[in-house]
């Protein structure tokens, strides 16, 4: 039992060590596999490392690709959608960073420059039908991080529906339901926030933690809408 506990502590220490690695350096990625359309689109948004980058309605309208506003401890950018593979979306900030989102709008990871952070929900995800959530729901998560050698670090979330907030997106006032997910475990003690459409559950804005002390804020400027069969 003591050996197992020591092993878990070692994993958590490695996981916590990811914080300065992420926050202190750029997340770099060469987009060699990206399509020419994706490259040309992402080239128009070379906004990494510029503080408080904010897109205007005119700029968003001028680009036909889906766009998301990103704010993180080490970057501020307007990201464009590179590709979608079986519901998994890859969003690029210039040629410098990539973030992965699932079909529900949750960040599933980021990678580059020899580092990778991934997160997943174990079991059924309440985010598949977020609008139906009334009572508190537990969410079992796991995180991986390299080179911190953190693998399958368990984190428990408690998702709670709150009231509605008025959220401004590109000058448009939207009345959205706020959901809070309290995270505990694996070196993380924090709260994820989601502002979603009351009828569809679509997440328009969120603040999500990818690692201890590292949270990203996302705002949907021009959402990706998958084709309907």
Image (spheres, rainbow, N blue to C red):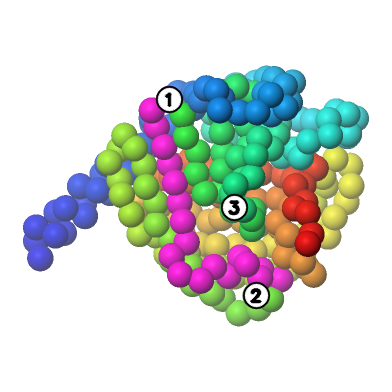
- Coordinates of residue 8 in the picture (x, y in percent): 21, 55
Q: Which mark is residue 113?
A: 1
Badge 1 local density, few (<14 within 10 Å), some, or many (20+)? few
| Quarter of the rendering containing residue 170 | top right
| Quarter of the rendering containing residue 154 | bottom left
Q: CA distance from mark 3 to mark 1?
A: 25 Å
Residue nearer the viewer, 73 or 86: 86
Left or right relative to 30: residue 71: right
Q: Residue at x 62, y 67 (%)?
A: 128
Residue at the extreme front of the image, as rendered: 229
Membership of 126 in magenta stretch: yes
**Secondary structure beneath label 2:** loop
Q: CA distance from mark 2 to mark 1?
A: 38 Å
- Residue bearing the label numbered 2: 133
| Quarter of the rendering containing residue 50 | top right
Q: CA distance from mark 2 to mark 3?
A: 25 Å
């Amino acid at each position: 039992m003591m050996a197992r506990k020591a092993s878990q502590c070692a994993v958590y220490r490695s996981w916590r060590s990811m914080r300065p690695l992420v926050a202190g350096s750029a997340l770099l990625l060469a987009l060699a596999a990206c399509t020419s359309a994706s490259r040309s689109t992402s080239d128009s948004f070379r906004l990494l490392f510029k503080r408080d980058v904010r897109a205007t309605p005119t700029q968003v309208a001028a680009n036909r690709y889906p766009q998301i506003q990103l704010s993180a401890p080490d970057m501020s950018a307007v990201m464009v959608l590179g590709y979608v593979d079986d519901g998994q979306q890859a969003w690029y900030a210039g040629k410098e960073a990539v973030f992965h989102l699932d079909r529900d709008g949750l960040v599933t990871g980021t990678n580059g420059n020899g580092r990778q952070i991934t997160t997943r929900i174990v079991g059924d995800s309440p985010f598949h039908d977020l609008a139906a959530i009334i009572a508190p729901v537990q969410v079992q998560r796991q995180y991986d991080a390299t080179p911190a050698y953190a693998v399958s670090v368990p984190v428990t979330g408690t998702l709670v529906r709150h009231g509605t907030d008025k959220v401004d997106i590109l000058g448009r006032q939207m009345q959205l339901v706020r959901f809070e997910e309290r995270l505990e475990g694996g070196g993380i003690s924090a709260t994820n926030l989601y502002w979603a459409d009351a009828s569809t559950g679509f997440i328009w804005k969120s603040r999500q933690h990818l690692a201890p002390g590292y949270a990203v804020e996302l705002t949907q400027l021009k959402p990706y809408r998958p084709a309907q069969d």
